[in-house]
Amino acid sequence: MAKRYGGEFSPDGQEPTGKPAMRGQFDGAQVNPAGARANLLFVPAIPLVFLSLNDGAIGMTLGLVAAGVLVAAALVLREGLRAEAAFNARRSARRPAFPRKMFASALTGVGIALAAFRSDYLDTEALAQTSVIAPALFGLVAAALHAASFGLDPMKDKGMEGIDTYQQDRVARVVEDAEAHLADMSNAIARAGDRRIEARVERFQATARDLFRTVEEDPRDLAGARKYLTVYLQGARDATVKFSDVYARTRDAKALADYAALLDDLEQNFAARTRKMLLDDRSDLTVEIDVLRERLQREGVRLE
């Protein structure tokens, strides 16, 4: 009878017992929220600049200001899309302090209104005879279409019930410093000029960010994870800088093997810490369930 082949490296294969699961290079990768759709908004400013160069002092000034406002709107929109993606990626998060996407819609409306006002001024050749009604309507329509296309910023906090905001602010500061260490690692390892070790660093960073997200969701875990987010990551960053300088000059295979082994140890320790915190959270849930059941039984509620 035919038997389907399967093994460790098959699509539905299982990792052998006792061997930790290997993360792929693109495990957890996400599409850049500020993609082509947002980048297209830089395009209208380019012809506007060139068309304004020979329109006299007022026409050129209006055109250049309109182009600058449109570029600023596109830049603010990109930041707003990234902030929204970070908000959606977390189970608990505060709404963005500054509504970037709505501000980008307003800037787009202002830029289009200035461009339309410039066009009307050039047609009438007299500033006093130029009406502001039509440019204002163009600007309002552009702002509304922009808001309809990209949506509004998150307006309410998410999953913040019962969370100590002071503790969450502490976690946010620690995570921000930890992300800076990871960024320094990425910048340093790029100097090594080896794509394989860069991919290995990215895999460790994905494991470290799992720990970040776990601490963010339960700020009580900060005390146990602080040394991982500060001391260990700072040491990993310093080791990465030194390895990159040595490997870029010498291509020493021994240095590469030692650094890869260090990343393996760090990744295993970070993953173990994340699993421990998740198990602690599960234990807390079990305790709360047992306490609730006991209380219900004392109240005379029969539990099947």
Image (spheres, rainbow, N blue to C red):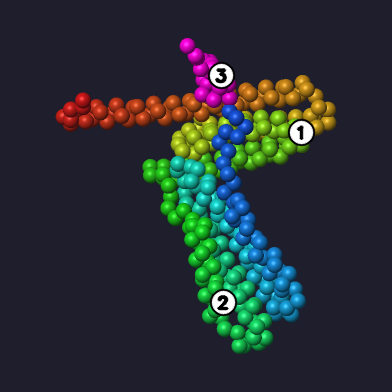
Amino acid carrying label 3: it is Glu
The residue that disc 3 covers is 8
Give how far apart the Cα atoms at labels 2 and 3 are: 65 Å
Is residue 14 magenta-colored? yes
Q: Position of residue 75 (x, y in %)?
A: 62, 58
Give percent across and percent down for residue 103. Answer: 54, 62
- Residue 292 x/y as whole percent: 27, 31
Query: In the orientation shown, which residue stands out farthest toward the top?
Result: 1
Q: Earlier in the sequence, mark 3 or mark 1?
A: 3
Q: Secondary structure at mark 2?
A: helix
Q: Quadrant of residue 66?
A: bottom right
Tag nearer the camera, 3 or 1: 3
Residue at image coords 67%, 65%: 45
Q: SS at mark 3?
A: loop
Within 10 Å of the Cα at label 1, are there few (<14), some (14-19), or many (20+) other Cα atoms?
A: many
Q: Please state which amino acid type lies under the numbered disc 2.
A: Pro
Tell me where the magenta segment starts and ends, as one range: 1-22
Q: Is residue 211 left or right of residue 51?
A: left
Where's residue 223, x and y in %? 50, 32
Q: Is residue 51 among the parts visible in the rendering?
A: yes
Q: Which residue is mark 2?
A: 135
Q: In this rendering, is residue 83 above or below 236?
A: below
Q: Of tags 1 and 2, which is closer to the observer? A: 2
| Label drawn at residue 192 | 1
Query: Crowding near pointer 2: few (<14 within 10 Å), some, many (20+)?
Result: many
